[in-house]
Image (cartoon, rainbow, N blue to C red):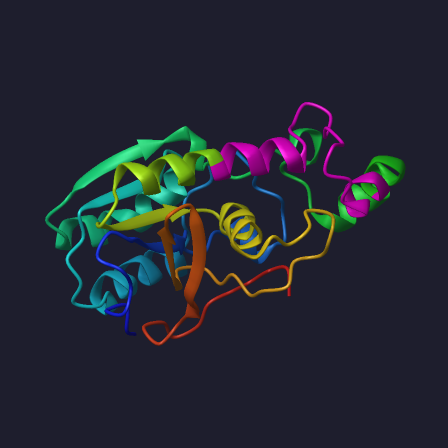
Amino acid sequence: MNLSTLPADATRLCLIRHGETDWNLARRLQGQTDIPLNATGLEQAEALARGFPAVAVDALYCSDLQRARQTAAPLLARLACAQRLSPALREQHFGIFQGHTYAEMAEQQPELYARYRARDPQWEIPQGESIQRFYDRVTQAFDAMAMQHRGQTLVVVTHGGVLDMLWRHAHAYPLSALRQVEIPNAAFNWVSWHQGRWQVEHWAVQDHLAAALDELT
């Protein structure tokens, strides 16, 4: 990994999706349900702490959901930096779909599931949030974070959907389109911000992991 070519005032961020949970294995939508890591997820958290590169980190931002906090804990113990918990870094709220598998959604709520699959950015999931509102929440949080920490390096431990929104933000990729990139549990994803522009530097780096799950692929 080489980020040395970035301008001195660029913000560097290592984005990490939380480790594995039992609901990931079951392809059950977690959203903002506060699910803990399973045994594999806890091992992944330890592995990412051991495998984190020799890079000085100025701050660690973390979703306040426990699967993110558990993932961040071993890394935080290694890094000499402050932790900042942020509800803005939570996964999308899937409303009535939270706690259900895709098969259950299709069987129990076929019309609503069809709307969910259509990826209309403006459609508000009942009792949840739309893709557009989720995107706005995430990108506003990251833009503010990057501006506040110009010239610094950050770690952000969060969720797969959050990483997807920032990837789309960097590539001006439509919210209505299907996801194009892999987002494994506990992988390293390096991005940078400079003068209002986001750039993906390295994505889905998994050399430190025995295996990692991306349940959407």
Closer-to-camera residue (190/93): 190
Image quarter where the C terminus lies is bottom right
Q: Is 76 one of the magenta-colored residues? A: no
Expressed as whole percent of the image width and height from the top left, the position of residue 147 reads 32, 39
Q: Residue at x 62, y 44 (%)?
A: 29
Whether 86 is drawn above or below 110: the answer is: above
The image quadrant of residue 113 is top right
Expressed as whole percent of the image width and height from the top left, the position of residue 54 reads 16, 67
Count of marks overlaid on the render: 0
Expressed as whole percent of the image width and height from the top left, the position of residue 48 reads 29, 63
The image quadrant of residue 209 is bottom left
Residue sitting at the far top: 127
In the image, taking residue 32 as reference, residue 44 lies left or right, namely left
Whether 52 is drawn above or below 22: the answer is: below
What span is in magenta? Answer: 114-139
Q: Residue at x 76, y 32 (%)?
A: 123
Image quarter where the N terminus lies is bottom left
Q: Is 129 one of the magenta-colored residues? A: yes
Closer-to-camera residue (196/121): 196
Q: Residue at x 41, y 55 (%)?
A: 19
Q: Residue at x 41, y 29 (%)?
A: 87
In the image, taking residue 55 as reference, residue 118 lies left or right, namely right
Expressed as whole percent of the image width and height from the top left, the position of residue 42 reads 33, 56
In the image, taking residue 168 as reference, residue 106 lies left or right, namely right
Residue sitting at the far right: 111
